[in-house]
């Protein structure tokens, strides 16, 4: 087992396009870490540099205490699971899983033992005699994972392994990967563009954009205290609402004026803002769709809006609203909390009122797009 350390890693192509900028991260032994971000953010390129499939333009890469910048992929003691399974179609599942061990000239008894153990862990023992074309997508992905398990590597690398599966199977495989991690207990680096996968699988997640790390932290840290507007908007579904507002400071006390209401901030955010010497200024206020309180009648400090679209999601409604000032807002409303009459009133064109408690407000600088409430001591790289 091993840690993985990336120090000032950079990837620049011949046309001077930089895919990864000054990437610094220490992945702990037996940690499950997830690189997440939109397409083109550099997450797969970073993974491929760890695997040795991409040359490193600058910086130092260590697996354990060994610098592996110039070490061949086969000598790095890693195993990689690809998005497209990469199975040999002309040989059986058993031989696909055994292939890398045969290349190492391992004896047949040990090969058989490892293949059977991995097949049992993944529930594919009955498929060992079949060829990949006879398997479903989920079964093929299990075989690809099994082929990696038998190598007993120091580090598992997974590049969007579930993206080719349908939603139901993706959920099932996600749960199986969580159970698999508990059984084999090694270091995982997992790449995905799906923030749900990132939040459910990772001990820590690395949010990337345009080749730069935006934030590193536990899923809860990144969700509760996003470092900037990009992270706040990328993590969470539906994404956080952003509204232009005014931060008011008076003798060390702070409040937000937004959409015609005045919201005094709690003691904790006030302390952070005071420590940073923040004064009254224009801000972008963020609030998550699930952190709003809905009212069917006007009340103190409520915001009037008009319903544009209602999305029925089963256990909850996603309400698309427009305020009197023209701002678009999305609210998440649990259906279990609604009476039949209330549900019937939630139609396009009808009025709805909402507000939010101060403890759920996020505050961003409109120029830098950084959170004014983020504590730099929370950085975890």
Image (cartoon, grey):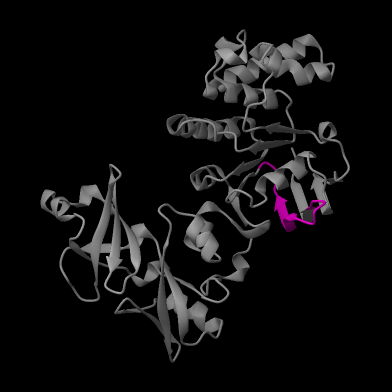
Residue found farthest to the left: 341
- Residue 266 vertical placement versus 126 (above, below): below
Can residue 381 be seen here? no
Foreground: 17 or 331? Answer: 17
Look at the image and say whether residue 116 sits in the magenta stretch: no
Task: Name the side, left or right, on which 11 lies relative to 184.
Answer: right
- Residue 162 vertical placement versus 225 (above, below): above
Residue found farthest to the front: 15
Q: x, y (%) of residue 284?
A: 45, 73
Picture quadrant where residue 354 is located: bottom left
Residue found farthest to the top: 129
Q: x, y (%) of residue 227?
A: 56, 65
Which residue occupies 62% across, 7% down? 129
Can residue 267 be seen here? yes
Q: x, y (%) of residue 60?
A: 83, 52
Q: x, y (%) of residue 104?
A: 84, 20
For the N terminus, the quadrant is: top right
What segment is highlighted magenta in the picture? Answer: 12-30
Residue found farthest to the right: 70
Foreground: 223 or 354? Answer: 354
Task: Name the side, left or right, on which 93 lies relative to 139.
Answer: right
Picture quadrant where residue 257 is located: bottom left
Which residue occupies 88% across, 43% down? 70
Question: Total number of numbered labels?
Answer: 0
Task: Name the side, left or right, on which 363 lies relative to 154.
Answer: left
Which residue occupies 76% across, 52% down? 6
For the C terminus, the quadrant is: bottom right
Look at the image and say whether residue 20 sits in the magenta stretch: yes
């Amino acid at each position: 087992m091993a840690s993985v350390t990336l120090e000032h890693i950079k990837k620049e192509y011949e046309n001077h396009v930089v895919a990864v900028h000054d990437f610094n991260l220490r992945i702990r032994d037996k940690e499950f870490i997830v690189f997440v971000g939109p397409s083109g953010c550099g997450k797969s390129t970073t993974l491929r540099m760890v695997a040795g499939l991409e040359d490193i333009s600058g910086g130092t890469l260590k697996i354990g205490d060994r610098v592996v910048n110039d070490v061949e992929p086969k000598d790095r003691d890693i195993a990689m699971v690809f998005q497209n399974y990469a199975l040999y179609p002309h040989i059986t599942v058993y031989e696909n899983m055994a292939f890398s061990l045969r290349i190492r000239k391992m004896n047949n008894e040990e090969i058989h033992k490892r293949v059977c153990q991995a097949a049992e862990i993944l529930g594919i023992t009955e498929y060992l005699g079949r060829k990949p074309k006879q398997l479903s997508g989920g079964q093929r992905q299990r075989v690809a994972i099994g082929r990696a398990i038998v190598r007993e590597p120091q580090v598992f690398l997974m590049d969007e392994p579930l993206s080719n599966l349908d939603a139901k199977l993706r959920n099932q495989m996600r749960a199986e990967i969580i159970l698999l991690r508990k059984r084999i207990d090694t270091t995982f680096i997992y790449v995905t563009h799906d923030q749900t996968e990132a939040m459910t699988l990772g001990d820590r997640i690395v949010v990337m954009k345009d080749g730069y790390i935006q934030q590193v932290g536990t899923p809860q840290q990144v969700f509760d205290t996003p470092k900037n507007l990009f992270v706040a908007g990328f993590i969470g579904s539906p994404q956080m609402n952003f509204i232009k507002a005014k931060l008011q400071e008076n003798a060390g006390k702070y409040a937000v004026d937004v959409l015609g209401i005045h919201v005094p901030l709690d003691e904790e955010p006030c302390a952070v803002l005071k420590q940073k010497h923040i004064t009254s200024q224009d801000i972008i206020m963020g609030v998550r769709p699930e952190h709003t309180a809905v009212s069917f009648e006007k009340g103190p400090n409520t915001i009037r809006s008009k319903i544009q679209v209602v999305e029925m999601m089963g256990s909850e409604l996603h309400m698309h609203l427009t305020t009197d000032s023209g701002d678009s807002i999305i609210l998440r409303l649990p259906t279990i909390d609604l009476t039949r009459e209330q549900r019937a009133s939630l139609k396009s064109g009808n009025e709805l009122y909402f507000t939010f408690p101060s403890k759920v407000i996020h505050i961003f600088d409109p120029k830098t797009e950084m959170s004014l409430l983020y504590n730099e001591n929370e950085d975890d790289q």
